[in-house]
Image: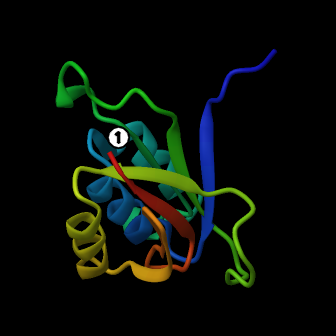
């Protein structure tokens, strides 16, 4: 009936959160800005991509065979902060749970809850996600 196209994350600063997630997810990148996109932003009054109100993270075609084939992830600026638990979240896998969680925490994530075999974390803006061993 339908195919998943994108996942959209509301946030206060799309550029920085998009970079965080692009660095977190294997085979993903922040979509590059071409001249047409920069012109569209300038026409909307945005002179610096760092202030872009919607930033795309996409599978990186340069990652080669076996690279991410998942959905695109849009980060869009909203005026209100996150207040309650996410209704939708991402589940990630890492080769080693303890090491993966430690690396994510070192990059700005926060541990929300530890369960038997998996951990709930929050990204730098508080959006929750789960981490499981591969």
Of residue 21 and residue 53, the one placed in the foreground of this image is 21
Q: Residue at x 71, y 75 (%)?
A: 85
Q: How crowded is the residue under tag 1: few (<14 C-alpha within 10 Å), some, or many (20+)?
A: few
Question: On the image, which quarter does residue 134 sit in?
Answer: top left
Count of marks placed on residues: 1
Q: Image height check: is 15 above or below 84?
A: above
- Left or right relative to 127: residue 133: left
Of residue 117 and residue 13, the one placed in the foreground of this image is 117
Q: Image height check: is 62 above or below 36?
A: above
Secondary structure found at label 1: helix
> Measured from the top left, where is residue 112 in percent x and y?
52, 82
Q: Residue at x 55, y 50 (%)?
A: 74
Question: Which residue of the protein is positioned furthest toward the front in this rendering?
Answer: 116
- Quadrant including the N terminus: top right
- Left or right relative to 63: residue 83: right
Q: Is residue 48 visible?
A: no
| Residue placed under numbered mark 1 in the picture | 35
Colour mode of the rendering? rainbow
- Left or right relative to 105: residue 132: right
């Amino acid at each position: 009936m339908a195919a998943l196209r994108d996942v959209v994350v509301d946030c206060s600063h799309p550029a920085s959160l998009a970079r965080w997630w692009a660095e977190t997810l294997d085979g993903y990148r922040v979509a590059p800005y071409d001249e047409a996109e920069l012109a569209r932003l300038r026409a909307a009054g945005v002179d610096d991509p760092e202030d872009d109100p919607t930033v795309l993270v996409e599978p990186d075609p340069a990652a080669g065979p076996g690279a991410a084939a998942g959905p695109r992830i849009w980060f869009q600026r909203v005026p209100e902060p996150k207040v309650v638990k996410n209704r939708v979240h991402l589940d990630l896998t890492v080769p080693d749970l303890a090491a993966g969680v430690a690396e994510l925490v070192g990059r700005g994530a926060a541990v929300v809850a530890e369960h038997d075999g998996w951990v709930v974390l929050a990204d730098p803006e508080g959006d929750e996600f789960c981490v499981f061993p591969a």
